[in-house]
Image (cartoon, rainbow, N blue to C red):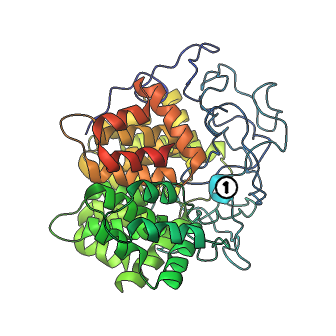
Amino acid sequence: MSYPPPQGGYPGYQQPPPGQYPPQGYPPQQAYGAPPPQGPPQGYGHPQAYPPPGQYGQPPQQHGYPSQPPPQGYPQQQQPYGAPSHSPYPQQQHPYGAPPPQGHFPPQGQYPPQQHGQYPPQQGQYPPQQHQQPPYGGPSAPYAAPPPQPYGAPPTMPTPPSPGYDPNQVAHVDMSGAADALRKAMKGFGTDESTLIRVLAHMTPQEIPALKQTYNQRHHRSLESDIENECSGYFEFALLAILRGPLQQDVWCINNALKGAGTKEALLDDILVGRSNADIRAIKTAYQQKYRRSLEADVKADLSAKTERMYLMILAASRQEESAPVLPHAVDADVMELHRATEAKTGTEQLTVCSILTNRSDGQIRAIAQAYERKYRRALESVIRSEFAGHMEDALVRMVRTGADKAMRDAISLEECMKGPGTKDERLTQRVTAVHWDRQHAAQVKGAYKHRFGKDLISRIKGETSGDYEKILVAMLE
């Protein structure tokens, strides 16, 4: 499925002059050679901690969880939508180590903790390790090996699992009131759907296991089974997606993508592409526990050739961590290797491109994309679209968009589900559910959607859905 042709900067949008951004402005990206921000880097999935609705441009509240140390030479993260903008490609680049220009960074200590770094790694988990970086464009590291690091670089801090991907992340709260309200809503004749929506729409990943356990202990019933018996259609589909929690929903979706005739590669991309090493390992472990099969073995059985190789590179969980430095010479080497493997020759070295993009961090991919466009006057996403096709094209484009701006990536993905004749309801429900787990990211996605498409995301969803199904999707995004 194609996207609008690129117009400079992020493919598909027009970069206005500095100081002339609309209120929902698309956040500019800083060149890879800029000095590091005064604060910790942001992690996967939804690395930038977004402000709540109505507070664009203001740093969100700290949550008290330790974050990772700042990397060296790391490019500036996206600003919140609506923050003052500047050109992503400044005419004069600041030297490494120079202080940041005044007015471009908040005071030290005011950067929000990264969304997926809100929970510190458990004692003994994810120890920093140092490895020599493989040749650019070479084969990926052995599967399940820790990500490589540039020679001589200081050890990096692994990105912790996302909320809901660590079994030790459990909310120790009293869920008896919520459990009783849900049982009352489904007991007897008829179902109180509004109560189901009110109770479940804003549950956190840590609260879901506690709620299901409390429901079972107090009422000797399975909450998921009761939902299946009392609800139907996409309303039931959405509620069950919430009750599985983010990790088990990912596992369920992967199994759904691989089972039966054909493979739903778009669903695999939603779950696997651009994830942190810790999340990939958690997904593989949970998949093995649930289905008693290796996820890598199922991918090999369902896919073939270079597409199979690409997904196995992703499942290797060998990406550079987000705390790894963005080194200018390494970025330049990747840019030249990507050009050599694509535009500079007849035929494309597809696995070389896959190897680079599946092994670099989001910050490194962002720097590579910016440097590529400056050097060759063409957006990296446009190069991928012209040199690749089908499922591999879609996956590689998603990798680049993940590094560029996750909020805009998700806004575009949601519109894909609604544009054209008919609504892709199952995919829309899956994507809304995935976005809603991080409230600040959901707010930023709404801002990105407004900027990109000139309309309100919730109003768009209301126009494509109806009934309780509409209400649960809207409630998750409000």
Closest to the observer: 468 or 208?
468
Q: How many marks?
A: 1
Q: Is residue 208 visible?
A: no
- Toward which corner of the image does residue 50 lie, by quadrant? top right
Q: Position of residue 256 (x, y in %)?
A: 28, 67
Q: In the image, what residue occupies the spot 54% across and 74% down?
A: 209
Q: Tell me residue 439's x, y (percent).
A: 58, 48
Asked where in the image residue 278 lies, by quadrant, the reply is bottom right
Percent x, y for residue 205?
55, 64
- Out of 171 and 154, give the one closest to the viewer: 171
**In the current view of this chain or complex, which residue is farthest to the left?**
261
x, y percent for residue 352: 40, 54
Determine whether, in the image, residue 199 is placed left or right of residue 103. Answer: left
Judging depth in this view, the residue of 263 and 474 nearest the camera is 474
Identify the residue at horizontal 25%, vertical 58% (top origin).
Answer: 233
| Mark 1 secondary-structure assignment | loop
**Left or right: where 82 falls relative to 220:** right
Q: Is residue 100 found left or right of 167 in the rendered image?
A: right
Question: Which picture quadrant has residue 351?
Answer: bottom left
Amino acid type of the residue that numbered disc 1 sits on in the rendered structure: Ala
Residue furthest to the front? 189
Per the image, the residue denoted by label 1 is 324
Residue at x-position 43% and y-position 43%: 474
72 up-or-down from 87: above or below: below
Q: Determine crowd level at label 1: few under 14, some 14-19, many 20+ residues with C-alpha closer than 10 A.
A: many
Q: Is residue 438 visible?
A: yes
102 lies left or right of 367 = right
Q: Quadrant of the N terminus?
A: top left
Q: Nearer the viewer, residue 162 or 138?
A: 162
